[in-house]
Image (cartoon, grey):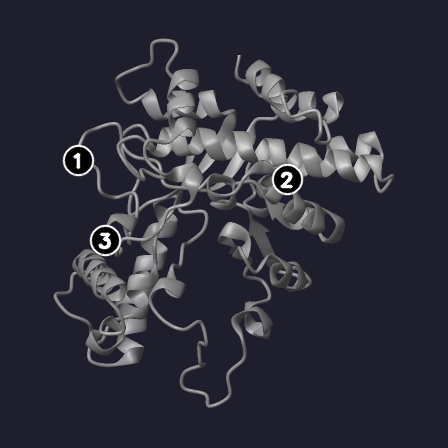
Amino acid sequence: MRAVFLLAAFASLAPSQILIDSRIAGEIAKIKAIDNHAHPVLPAPGDTGYDALPVEHMDPYTEPVRMRAPSPLAAEASRQMFAQPHPKDNSYPAWILDQLGIETMLANRIALGPGILPPRFRWVPFEDALLFPLDNSGLAAVNSDRKAFFEDEDRLLNQYLKECGLSKPPATLAEYLVKVVNPTLERHKRGGAIAVKFEAAYLRSLDFQDVPQAVAESVFNDPRLRKTSFVMLHGGWPFTREITALLTKPNVYTDFSAQTLTNYPRAVSRVLREWLEFAPDKILFATDAYPYSEELGWEQSGWIASRTGREALGLALTEMLNDREISLDRALELAHLVLHDNAAKLYNLR
């Protein structure tokens, strides 16, 4: 039913706009996607583990029209998803994925829990707290957002320290690496983590220096990290052209999460077309499904992002097909790459 609805939605564009090729739309609607980035919520009440830096701790900001309450898109998402009875037990999160046409969701969470477990959900823990073992009052004083965020990071670091059998960070960097950083990363890997999440841009400059060496290189250019894959979440919007250039790095990928919530399909399609023409094997579908508000939960935001992302991908591929840049077979192949196969290869998912 979801595939039929999505196909109908693609065909309902205004006559003055380019119509998505029906063959491309039909194939896109059938693909069970891998969601590279989302924040699913446990079915039990009171869950707060869906983010290390919850957006509700930020200062008020102007929300994009598509996300403002009451959101017509959120209401439509609820109507489409909950037209039929839904489970009220731990099977609920997987049921939501079925409604979104998602095979596997990478769950950016402090920890997994009942209902949000492999194989449908794969864990991506937060590791920023490990970067800040010292007094962060100077960094926190930059603005009120950072003050709240560093309080969050301090709580998470204390949790990691406790899990390592410590009440405070060791006295030296060498001890901290051996007794806290390495054991925490190893514990997360044993717990099923397939990647790690950094939100450093909310907390500090991204100009990381090498310690203790005096000369620093950017993280993407560091030859020691060539076997480490980096995925730039949200596609760097609004700096999407700069992201295109960064895709020349052999170990750098991007997804287009968040853009599919804040922007309309045609705007997202222009970004996707440039990336598809440049490095189609490095683009990952993602929703950034998140509990933004009572009206716009992770379910509704996931539905909006999934619908917008598929429509934008269909528009980009149709335009490339019409301009004779690609064949129909290649367009269908690219649809599978973006929605599923690129992520499956990157994370070694089957």
Relative image position of residue 47 (x, y in whole percent): 21, 37
Q: Residue furthest right?
A: 324
Relative image position of residue 38 (x, y in whole percent): 41, 41
Callout 2: SS: helix
Q: Which residue is mark 1?
A: 46
User: Which mark is drawn over residue 57?
Assistant: 3
Do we see residue 51 in this rendering? Answer: yes
The C terminus sits in image quarter:
top right
Task: Judge from the rendering whether residue 64 lies leftward or rightward of residue 254; answer left or right.
Answer: left
Q: Quadrant of residue 66?
A: top left
Relative image position of residue 48 (x, y in whole percent): 22, 42
Q: How many marks?
A: 3
Residue shown at the point (75%, 22%) measured from the top left: 23
Q: Nearer the viewer, residue 346 or 99?
A: 99
Foreground: disc 3 or disc 2: 3
| Amino acid identity at mark 1 | Gly
Residue shown at the point (33%, 67%) measured from the top left: 203
